[in-house]
Amino acid sequence: MTWLKKNPQAPRLRSGATRGNGARLVGGMMLLAGATLGLGGCKVSDVSREGPKPAPTAVQRVDPTFPSEAVVCTEQGGTLEIAGSGFSPLPINTLREDEGLALPKVTLVDGSGNKVEVPVSALDVAAGKMTVTLAANALPAGTYDVVVDNPNGQSGTLAGAVSVVPPPQVTAIEPATVPSGTATPVTLTGAYFRGTADGVLPTAFLTLVSTTNSYDLNGIALPSDTQLTGNTPDTLDVGRYDVTVRNPEGCQATLPDALEVIQVNQIDLAESVDPSFGWVEARTTIEILASNAEGKGLHHHRRRGDSAAARVLPEHGGCHLAVADERRHPLAQR
């Protein structure tokens, strides 16, 4: 349809009246519709390809608390802002009660032909920005082109602009038992651990089973997309913990009941040590009688002045200490 100014020399029409050529006078303007008219030979088509051509140039994520890179998780979705030029709406159903605007259409398309139209929730023509929302589970993981189609039929594409990624997976934590009161290095294994291009790393935290008490792992490092390392805090209560990894784009995974924190007691040694010597180039089992060796405990000791490692396990009011001198020297009695 085409709007033309009213010709003051033309025969006057009442508002809403029609002429033989189908022209109507509405609100002081002559609205011409349909076929070729005798005013300049204009032909009005339903869709015009005249007008601006959309040119998307950048995409960023605008969800609060998330990094701005255009990455969303398959299970979560997200809100994206598309910047560019030529984004042009088109009036529809003009002069009708249901009149409105036809907004540009945005479609995400991958190399295999997977695609989904994402609704436009906001359009700022002057600023050259559109906001769209990708729903959860709308697309499989992959890299997607952003295609913008204006209602006038013009189209523009920004290749490889959006990444859709799977959520992380957590399969193990090592060691699975750590002492309370001590920061302990741990390694988490799994899949799809990821950071951002500007260095934002995943987070990992421990939640005491059957509570909401959570503790972050400290010193996170990401050697690969299948391994994450960190240190347990020294404030963990005794108990069992769920282990959770959350990627920067927001998706997370939990390995339930995966870590046990145990109480470790200092063993007070009595004077009874048998035998009171060790053999060169041989392992020697020494029985030490301790006054408080009851309960569950696991202790690693390194004696001053040598490199011997001792592992102590309580047993029936005493304990057994297996000593291995790495330098193959006998151990002095202490």
Image (tube, grey):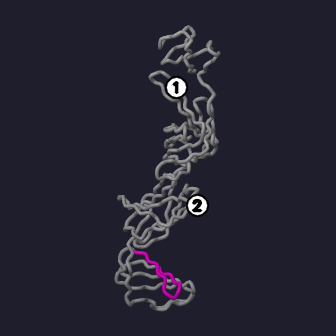
Please tell me which residue lies in front, 306 or 52.
Answer: 52
Q: Give residue 23's position: percent from left, percent from top.
A: 55, 13
Circle 2: element type: strand
Task: Inspect the magenta stretch and tell me whether residue 309 lies in it.
Answer: yes
Task: Inspect the magenta stretch and tell me whether residue 308 lies in it.
Answer: yes
Q: Residue at x 58, y 56 (%)?
A: 197
State which region is magenta: 297-310
Q: Residue at x 57, y 10 (%)?
A: 21
Q: Amino acid at mark 2?
A: Ser
Q: Residue at x 56, y 21 (%)?
A: 3
Q: Give residue 252's position: percent from left, percent from top.
A: 48, 54
Q: Give residue 296's position: percent from left, percent from top.
A: 38, 73
Q: Which residue is mark 1?
A: 92
Please tell me which residue lies in front, 106 or 238.
Answer: 106
Q: Is residue 98 above or below residue 179?
A: above
Please tell me which residue lies in front, 258 or 119.
Answer: 119
Q: Which residue is mark 2?
A: 224
